[in-house]
């Protein structure tokens, strides 16, 4: 299956990149290695980046292992994983082309969803595999044959590109999904009317999320308000109003001179429509109000809105990893604001552990930007000090 081959290729690249970096140690820089191989430093950086898709050809691979002067056994192991990374990626590409001709896009979408939700183990590798598969399906498919499936693919791409900190690509695919939906007539989808409505509103929502991740909060808010005016939203208002209010709250908090009253009103209305059917959304609405209090400099008012300790989240069923880390991040912010460094670090540690296990680069970068040395120290304990140092330099 394509995704299995793509993930295996990714894992082989992670292994050879780690082995090369370990063999290089402090003896030679990437720039010096590039000069020896007569290639650019950027090229060396890319082929040693575990999550860059570029791979060295056989000749360059041999030159690399000769230049780093590693032990013969290490050299053979590096070449072995380099070769397997290339072979599995080629097999994955060919396999996907074959699967697209033999299976429907909806069947392949089921595989993508299953792969994306397969748990936290090697999550980042899976995210890249799903992202590449989605991109390939769009390239190889005819959008006119199954427009709603193509919109789902663009939406899936937006989601994983956001997780992987590729916000420009995420915005592009959110807008692409939106433009497709605007070109469709709901009357042509009477059998899939509910799906059509869901995707129509969701394409606006993912565009808002993409703007938010780029720090464009006014554009984010404009999308949220525009979604609220859509008849498609009103047909499923019990589902959408809490979620659109949550998005609107997050946008308002990023805009200067927002009022607590506006934030609280959105949260209260969202909970009214929610009627306790989704405890995760209820928690996130509370977290939005808590964030507003924290930004207004009244942290004690935020206390009732957040869990008292990280383990309290375990009592709420169905809270996903991304939502959990966002709530924990606000919990850390609250505890540090109250002057309790120990409690703040407990929340921070729990959030970073989830981020690392799940491959949430964007969330990790945001935490580093806000909490600085405290977050970097925890990441170093978890073996991600190099990532922390790179992010803090930016």
Image: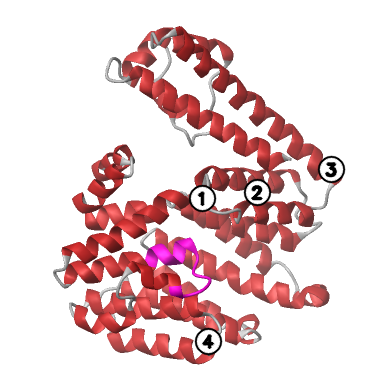
Q: Where is residue 37 in the image (x, y as percent from the top left)?
A: 42, 10
Residue at the spot 43% in from the left edge and 15% down from the top edge: 39
87 within the magenta span: no
Mark 1 → mark 2, Cα distance in angstroms: 13 Å
Give yes or no for contact between labels 1 and 4 (Cβ–Cβ under 8 Å): no
The answer to whether residue 319 is left or right of residue 258 is right
Residue at the spot of label 1: 169
> Does dot 4 land on a helix, a strand or a loop?
helix
> Does dot 3 land on a helix, a strand or a loop?
helix
Q: Can residue 165 be seen in this view?
A: no
Q: Which label number is shown at residue 101? A: 3
Sequence-earlier tag: 3 or 1? 3
Give yes or no for contact between labels 3 and 1 (Cβ–Cβ under 8 Å): no
Q: Where is residue 297 in the image (x, y as percent from the top left)?
A: 17, 77
Sequence-earlier tag: 1 or 2? 2
Residue at the spot of label 4: 274
Sequence-earlier tag: 2 or 3? 3
Q: Which residue lies furthest to the right in this view?
A: 102
Task: Tell me which corner region of the image, top left, top right, bottom left or bottom right, holds residue 107.
Answer: bottom right
Q: Quadrant of the N terminus?
A: top right
Mark 2 → mark 4, Cα distance in angstroms: 32 Å
């Amino acid at each position: 299956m394509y995704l299995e081959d793509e993930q295996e290729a990714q894992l082989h690249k992670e292994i050879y990149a780690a082995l090369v970096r370990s063999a290089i140690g402090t003896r030679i820089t990437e720039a010096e290695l590039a000069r020896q191989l007569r290639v650019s430093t950027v090229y060396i950086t890319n082929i040693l980046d575990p999550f860059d898709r570029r791979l060295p050809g056989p000749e360059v691979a041999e030159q690399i292992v000769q230049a780093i002067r590693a032990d013969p056994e290490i050299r053979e192991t590096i070449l072995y994983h380099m070769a397997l990374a290339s072979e599995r990626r080629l097999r994955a590409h060919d396999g996907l082309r074959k699967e697209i001709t033999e299976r429907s896009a909806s069947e392949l979408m089921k595989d993508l969803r299953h792969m994306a939700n397969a748990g936290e183990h090697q999550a980042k590798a899976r995210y890249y595999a799903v992202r590449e598969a989605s991109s390939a399906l769009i390239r190889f498919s005819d959008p006119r044959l199954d427009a709603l499936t193509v919109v789902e693919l663009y939406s899936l791409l937006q989601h994983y590109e956001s997780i992987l900190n590729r916000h420009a690509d995420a915005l592009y695919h959110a807008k692409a999904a939106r433009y497709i939906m605007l070109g469709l007539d709901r009357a042509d989808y009477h059998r899939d009317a509910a799906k059509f409505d869901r995707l129509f509103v969701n394409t606006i929502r993912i565009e808002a999320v993409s703007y938010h991740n780029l720090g464009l909060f006014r554009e984010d808010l404009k999308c949220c308000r525009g979604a609220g005016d859509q008849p498609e939203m009103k047909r499923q208002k019990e589902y959408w109003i809490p979620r659109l209010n949550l998005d609107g709250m997050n946008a308002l908090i990023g805009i200067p001179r927002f009022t607590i009253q506006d934030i609280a009103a959105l949260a209260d209305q969202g909970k009214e429509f929610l009627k306790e059917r989704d405890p995760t959304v209820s928690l996130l609405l509370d977290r939005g109000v808590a964030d507003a209090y924290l930004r207004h400099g009244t942290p004690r008012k935020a206390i009732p809105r957040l869990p008292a300790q990280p383990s309290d989240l375990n009592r709420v069923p169905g809270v996903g990893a991304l939502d959990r880390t966002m709530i924990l991040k606000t919990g850390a912010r609250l505890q540090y604001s109250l002057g309790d460094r120990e409690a703040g670090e407990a929340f921070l540690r729990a959030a970073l552990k989830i981020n690392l296990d799940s491959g949430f680069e964007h969330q990790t970068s945001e935490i580093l930007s806000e909490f600085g040395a405290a977050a970097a120290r925890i990441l170093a304990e978890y073996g991600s000090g190099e990532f922390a140092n790179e992010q803090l330099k930016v």
